[in-house]
Amino acid sequence: MNIQVTLDNDITVLRIEGRLWEEADSIELDRMIDESLDRGCMCFVTDLTGVPIMNSSGLGSLIAAMKKIKSRSGDMVLTGVNDRLDHLFQITRLYTVFKTYEDIDAAVENMHA
């Protein structure tokens, strides 16, 4: 897994590529979120366009990230959810937890609204 972090004004954009399903992936995601929160960034767009598949550990990583961000009064949304991931979000009912957008631009625009 690879994560690229960029800033769009006050929004941290996390572009994840590869499978999201090992403990090391969770640790890396957690570290990047901590760094952004420590810089005062409270809004996150997590782009999953490059994630072909995810297991329960990957879902746990996203839930833990959301919990951490919300505990600091922040917000996180997802973009680029493919059909396979969408099905996973549907059967786990996590679509009720995460807001999703078609692409990064739509998510950033909505977060600025």
Image (cartoon, rainbow, N blue to C red):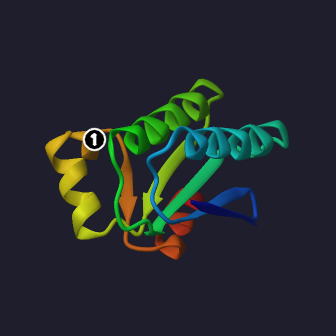
Residue 15 vertical placement versus 39 (above, below): below
Q: Position of residue 39 (x, y in %)?
A: 85, 43
Which residue position holds label 1? 94
Of 107 and 37, the residue lying toward us: 37
Q: Residues within 10 Å of mark 1 (few under 14, many from 20)?
A: some
Q: Amino acid at mark 1?
A: Leu
* In this view, 57 is above or below 113: above
Q: What residue do we see at 46% from left, 42% from top? A: 62
Q: Residue at x 64, y 38 (%)?
A: 27
Task: Estimate the x, y position of residue 112 in percent, counting from the top left.
Answer: 59, 60
Residue 4: give x, y in percent of width and height. Answer: 68, 65
Q: Nearer the viewer, residue 68 or 1?
A: 1
Whether residue 26 sits left or right of residue 4 in the image: it is left
**Left or right side of 106 for 94:** left
Direction top: furthest residue: 71
41 with respect to 73 (left or right): right
Image location of residue 59, percent across then percent down = 38, 42
